[in-house]
């Protein structure tokens, strides 16, 4: 084996590895964009839901204060619990937050898993799993639709 053939062989391998590197970078960037969409969607949903909940809690507190002011100290001392907001008013926002964060985490997992599987398929030379990529895109679309619905409901 002469020097020229060794150089050609190394050159061919470097070009192959360089091509794989470019494809991995493209897949990574696409995955990061999808992750960004999922995170932003989850964040917007949380903000919308928690803003609505804060308004409800505030209005309940104001009405309780007005009721307490009208009824007087004797009535408040006799039944202090009746002047507190309903338990659901305080617990529902927490449950919504847990649901949104869990759903966002699941969507992030799917997107990252899809990206990793696509990169692995690219490096091994096997065709990428189309089902998983399609599922990740549909998940992103669902998250965007959920955010749009939440924004409309808040307005």
Image (cartoon, rainbow, N blue to C red):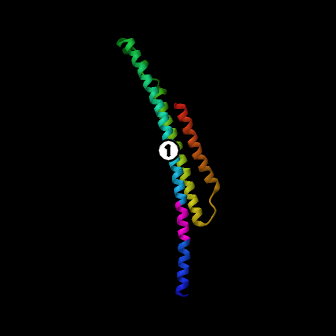
Q: Is residue 134 left or right of residue 31?
A: right
Q: Position of residue 73 (x, y in %)?
A: 35, 13
Q: Look at the image and give the residue range highlighted in magenta.
A: 16-25
- Prevailing secondary structure of the magenta residues: helix
Q: Examine the rendered structure and indicate whether residue 29 appears above or below residue 139.
A: below
Q: Residues within 10 Å of mark 1 (few under 14, many from 20)?
A: some
Residue at 59% of width from left, 45% of height from top? Answer: 141
Farthest left residue? 73
Quadrant position of the N terminus in the picture: bottom right
Residue 97 location (% of width, % of height)? 48, 37
Reply above or below: 5 against 113: below
| Residue hosting label 1 | 40
Q: Is residue 107 left or right of residue 61?
A: right
Say if 122 sits above or below 8 in the image.
above
**How far across and down, in percent of the image, does residue 22 sit?**
53, 64
Percent of width and height locating residue 31: 54, 54
């Amino acid at each position: 084996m002469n020097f020229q053939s060794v150089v050609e062989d190394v050159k061919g391998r470097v070009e192959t590895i360089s091509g794989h590197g470019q494809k991995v970078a493209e897949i990574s960037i696409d995955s990061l964009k999808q992750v960004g969409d999922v995170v932003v969607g989850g964040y917007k949903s949380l903000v919308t839901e928690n803003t609505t909940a804060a308004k409800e809690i505030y209005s309940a507190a104001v009405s309780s204060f007005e009721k307490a002011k009208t009824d007087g100290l004797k009535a408040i001392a006799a039944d202090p619990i009746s002047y507190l907001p309903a338990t659901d008013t305080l617990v529902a926002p927490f449950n919504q937050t847990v649901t949104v964060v869990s759903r966002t985490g699941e969507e992030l997992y799917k997107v990252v898993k899809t990206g990793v599987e696509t990169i692995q398929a690219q490096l091994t030379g096997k065709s990428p799993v189309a089902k998983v990529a399609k599922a990740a895109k549909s998940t992103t679309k669902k998250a965007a639709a959920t955010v749009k619905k939440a924004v409309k409901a808040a307005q």
